Image (cartoon, rainbow, N blue to C red):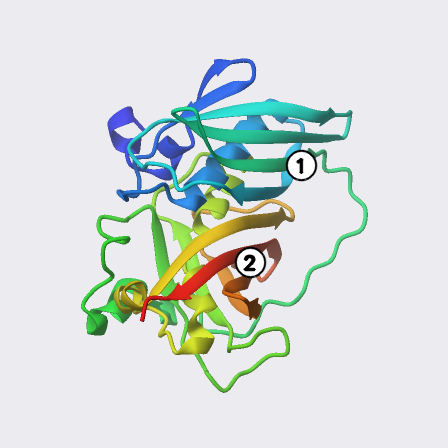
Amino acid sequence: MTTAQTEGTLEALFALEQTSPRTWTGTSDVVQLPQLFGGQLVGQSIVAAGRSAGEEKRVHSSHTTFLRPGLSQVPVLFTVETLRDGRRHAVHEVSAWQEDELVCRTVVSSATDDGGIGHGRPRPTTAPPEDSTDLRVLAEEDGGLGEFWEGFSAVEVRVAPIDEDARVPHSAVAPRNIWMRATDRLPDDPLLHRAALAYASDLMLMATAVAPHGAVTGHERTMADQWWAVSLDHVLWFQGDLRADEWLLFEHTTPMAHAGRALVQAAVFDGDGTTVCQVSQEALVRPLR
């Protein structure tokens, strides 16, 4: 792709500029919001840490704590501190800065793939992406998707039919099975696909957090009118190779909430049903009315 073709894509978003051995600069040109999108910060932090770890190691986990909202039209400076750099395992702490304000901090672990124990849970039984409904279609009866999704095109989102009676022991509400993929083809760089999955993993979680309280999945405009929510932290554990520009199934669940803090989780599977990631996020959620 040329520069013109990649502008506004996830590939461009993750093309960080290295400004020193331990600093990187990123822009935000995918989602036009007053504040920074959390998925952007997590994905860019993973790229900064992964580039620092080197190609021989793969990112296998990231733990982000969000500290301030940040500004979407201001560049982000990522400083990388090496906490461990072993032959097989590396740990980096990435701090995201805007105008001398610390926006978030992420600890990223990387390791070589040396084999060993491996297992994964079965993919849930649900409709395939071709039989699932585009999020924009679901939102039509709610007056459209609203400000957040205006002009958003980096990730395609489809929602499988929801059976509200299909309760499971690990969630307070029936799982929301969401298919997502990057709209544009990504290069064959495993790090970029992990970053793109991380970006997508921050979508639709809030809708699941308030689903036990009557929120309808896909009605993002009404949810924004009725609820205020902010992410507190975001954790991912990766397993094996994946392609974020092919359909991935995110099974969203919420096992608990207390004192306005909701825990939302997502088990992520590829098209073959293989587990590729586990996501956990805690969010502060409050009703506006």
Disc 1 marks a residue whose amino acid type is: Ser
- Measured in 3D between alpha carbons, the distance from the residue under mark 2 to the one under mark 1, in whole angstroms, is 19 Å
Q: Nearer the viewer, mark 2 or mark 1?
A: 1
Q: Residue at x 76, y 53 (%)?
A: 118
Q: Residue furthest bottom?
A: 165
Q: Residue furthest left?
A: 143
Q: Which picture quadrant has residue 179?
A: bottom left
Above/below status of 60 relative to 265: above
Q: Position of residue 88 (x, y in %)?
A: 76, 30
User: Is residue 101 left or right of 224 when viewed as pictured?
Assistant: right
Q: Residue at x 51, y 59 (%)?
A: 271
User: Is residue 169 left or right of 282 when viewed as pictured?
Assistant: right
Disc 2 marks a residue whose amino acid type is: Val
User: Disc 1 marks which residue?
Assistant: 109
Does residue 229 show up? Answer: yes
**Classed neighbour count for the residue bearing mark 1: other residues with Cα under 10 Å, few (<14), some (14–19), many (≥20):** many
Q: Position of residue 169 (x, y in %)?
A: 64, 78
Number of labelled discs? 2
Q: Which picture quadrant has residue 8?
A: top left
User: Is residue 236 left or right of 245 when viewed as pictured?
Assistant: right
Q: Which picture quadrant has residue 142?
A: bottom left
Q: Residue at x 29, y 25 (%)?
A: 3
Q: Which of 250/204 is in front?
A: 204
User: Dot 2: what SS?
Assistant: strand
Q: Quadrant of the N terminus?
A: top left
Q: Residue at x 30, y 64 (%)?
A: 220
Going from the N terminus, do you reach mark 2 or mark 1 first?
1
Above/below status of 11 relative to 289: above
User: Disc 2 marks which residue?
Assistant: 268
| Rendered image: mark on residue 153 | none
Q: Residue furthest top?
A: 20
Does residue 270 show up? Answer: no
